[in-house]
Amino acid sequence: MIDGKAPPEKAWDVVGLGANSVDFVHLLPGYPQPFGSFAKMRIEKQEILCGGQTATAMCACARLGLRAKYAGVTGGAKLAPDFLANLQASIARFNGFAKTGKDLDFHRGERVVEQLFNGDVKEEPGRTNPTMWPLSASGPYYAALVVAGTLDTKGGPKTDTHGRVLDTGDKPIPGLYGVGNCVASASGRAYWAGGATLGPIIAFAYRTAQAASADPGSKA
């Protein structure tokens, strides 16, 4: 009781905090190789899938009957007063690198793997770096907001195979679940391969949602 009144009814069983994303899935005829006929290949099919780890986990919870809510606001971010001047300077600097083929800032195109995943490019006079080409000096330009996030983090709370967060004695904390990059990685200190977060999030989001749905505390 609060001030003689009954506590309000719980609005949500689980709330997910984090960024969503868009995944571009390319279907290839085989696994790319550094050399030979499979060094470069044409994409057979492309799909655009919406979601991200947090959003995927919330959808799984909702499908299992939990009252799930996704919270992913960007806050009050605004462009800095010197944004335009910095943009113009950045474009001019990048275009200079693209013309010479030498990226002095990020060294694009210097590694074989970068050129491998860059794919085929149009042969044009003056192109000396297949990963770079001058941007239009007048635009129009399109931008995306880039904010802090997590990818393949090795930190975070330890969980069991049901997504239950464990305490320092490796005992489940009642009613506390975690899945995705916000918890310790299933691969430990290892990194299996590119996209290694996708399989675990599919498996553990399902298992965690199942466990949370069966948790007596979720119906309280």
Image (tube, grey):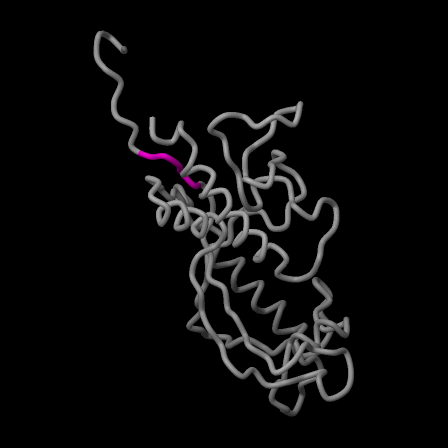
Residue visible at 49% across and 30% down in the picture: 176
Residue at the limit of the structure toward the top, as seen here: 4
On the picture, is 193 further left or further right than 164?
A: right
Residue at the limit of the structure toward the left, as seen here: 5
Q: Residue 93: x percent and y percent?
A: 63, 67
Q: Residue 212: x percent and y percent?
A: 44, 37
The answer to whether residue 41 is above or below residue 18 is below
Residue visible at 65% across and 39% down in the picture: 155
Q: Pick the quarter of the image with the C terminus.
A: top left
Q: Pick the quarter of the image with the N terminus.
A: top left
Query: In the image, which residues are magenta?
Result: 12-16
On the picture, is 164 further left or further right than 100?
A: left
Residue visible at 59% across and 39% down in the picture: 183
On the picture, is 146 further left or further right than 58?
A: right
The answer to whether residue 218 is above or below residue 41 is above
Residue 131 image-quadrant placement: bottom right
Can residue 217 be seen here? The reply is: yes
Q: Residue 144: x percent and y percent?
A: 46, 60
Q: Residue 169: x percent and y percent?
A: 66, 23
The secondary structure making up most of the magenta span is strand
